[in-house]
Amino acid sequence: MTQATAPTRATGVEMTHRQILEALSGLLLGMFVAILSSTVVSNALPRIITELKGGQSAYTWVVTSTLLATTATTPIWGKLADLTSKKILVQLSLAIFVLGSVLAGLSQSTEQLIACRVLQGVGAGGLTALAQVIMATMIAPRERGRYSGYLGAVMAVGTIGGPLIGGVIVDTSWLGWRWCFYVGVPFAIAALVVLQKTLHLPVVRRQVKIDWWGATLITAAVSLLLIWVTLAGDKYDWISWQSAVMVTGAVVLGTLAIRVENRASEPMIPPRLFRNRTITLAVVASIAVGVGMFGASVFLGQYFQISRGESPTMSGLMTMPMILGLLVSSVVVGRIITRTGRWKRYLVAGSALLTAGFALMGTIRYDTPYWHLAIYMALIGLGLGMTMQNLVLAVQNTVSTHELGAASSVVAFFRSLGGAVGVSVLGAVLGHRVKDYIADGLTALGIPASGSGSGGVLPDVHTLPGPIRIVVESAYGHGAGDIFLAAAPFGLIALIAVIFIKEIPLRQHTGDAVTDTVARESAVAAGGGAAVVRTGTDR
């Protein structure tokens, strides 16, 4: 049995390997629900948007709304984790997520679906932030790579199973796409029961002060920016008075948010954390990884179904190389990091693979041989498996235990922010490029090009005449290649950022690293002498 032996402080606990696995079981099941409920929709979205008569902008916002809500609420959940019971918080976030999923299944329009996806995002923000915080509370940084591998495996299984289950549900006439939102409910109920029985952590009791002004201003700034990117070039020109008003408004709101955060006693995103070079560079890399991970890969289902005419089930099967790459690299690299205590080389290698994968995917067209696609997707999966969890690990290794929630949620926040911006920007790029490619293709056939904008209804290629079908498939295939190519520079940014991160060997205990120089730079006394009360842990 592996057991922590160093003295612990604040929220650190000592647990055996078996106790950690028991405590993590419900948490991992909850994460599986969140991932499953997200990925099960991915291959169903083209069918959902078509049946609800939505267009490319609606497709984009069904994804963006969840990411935006996740982004906005992640720091709140992370701050609450530093102030109150993590167990209650993770159960609450799971309940909110389930409620949003059920309501999404009842949606009658794209507007209702987007609103329900926002509620899902609120719950996902809690699960995203709290999973990392709870792991950091129980497990020393040196051992955390091993357990992060378990988390990566669960993510991979959920990501593999989701599209396949979603495809089968959509292709089964007596079920229909609404069951994509209901399928996770039994798992969620099981997760709540398991969490109640197995998760027992120390509780830090302090006066809760949530920086609502900061959270509101940050959310408003990001939302306004995403709305502008989504609508510009479609509803109005990129250079127009509407663009000027929205961009200026986003800058003003962002400036006010920074001012409020600097003055708040309990800021959502503590500015002092950014004095730590590791955290700052990890945030830059997380934004870049988020843009690539969400912004490009979310459109894979659309590419396979529209550009290649595949069914939702087959679309799920065709993304397997990327998911298997994620599974293998997260588990194997996690164990290696636990054994050696070294992590930077894997961040560098993962970022390089991510950049190469996106660049190669930028060459795809509707008729690209599948074995080429399989190699490119595998590279992306390997890169994501090496970077996602290890960026959080690098940050957690540099802060004191009372700031684990804030620091972990900062990385998750900016990764989700990058994803939301990526989906919005790349979705807009895809819509505009497809419009131009379809117009050019129809003109070449001698057909007037009209009504094929980004806001038009997504086509069902199986109902189109042969020549027009080829034009549409080619347009969406070429557009997909363009957005992957646009994502490649973000992978390069992540690579440059992680190269400059200074590697600090992982700590072998869960308490404050009072002898660690980097940790001393980040540690700040919490709450002016606020009392800390422990509860017992299972033994």
Image: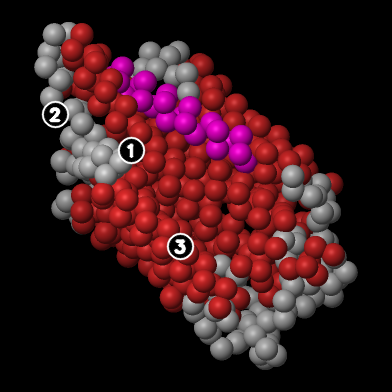
**Disc 3 secondary structure class:** helix
Residue 217 found in image quarter: bottom left
- The reply to whether residue 150 is visible in this rendering is no
Which residue: 84% across, 75% down? Answer: 7
* Amino acid found under the numbered disc labelled 3: Gly
Asked whether, in this view, residue 13 is left or right of residue 378, the answer is right
Mark 2 touches mark 3? (CB < 8 Å) = no
Q: Nearer the viewer, mark 2 or mark 3?
A: 3
Instruction: Report, in whole angstroms, how far the alpha carbon at label 2 lies from the one at label 3.
Output: 37 Å
Q: Residue furthest top?
A: 445
Q: Earlier in the sequence, mark 2 or mark 3?
A: 3
Residue 509 point in image, percent of width and height: 81, 66
Does the magenta-highlighted stretch encompass residue 484?
A: yes
Q: How packed is label 3: few (under 14 Cα within 10 Å), some, or many (20 or more)?
A: some
Residue 510 point in image, percent of width and height: 77, 68
Q: How packed is label 2: few (under 14 Cα within 10 Å), some, or many (20 or more)?
A: few
Residue linked to disc 2: 451
Looking at the image, is 262 positioned above or below residue 456? below
* Amino acid found under the numbered disc labelled 2: Gly
Residue 86 point in image, percent of width and height: 56, 74
Residue linked to disc 1: 428
Tag on residue 254?
Answer: 3
Which residue: 72% across, 56% down? Answer: 277
Instruction: Report, in whole angstroms, how far the alpha carbon at label 1 lies from the one at label 3.
Output: 23 Å
Q: How packed is label 1: few (under 14 Cα within 10 Å), some, or many (20 or more)?
A: many
Q: How many numbered marks are there?
A: 3
Which residue: 60% across, 70% down? Answer: 270
Magenta part of the chain: 472-494
* Amino acid found under the numbered disc labelled 1: Ala
Q: Earlier in the sequence, mark 2 or mark 1?
A: 1
Please tell me whether the stretch drawn in magenta is mainly helix, strand or loop. Answer: helix
Instruction: Report, in whole angstroms, how far the alpha carbon at label 2 lies from the one at label 1.
Output: 17 Å
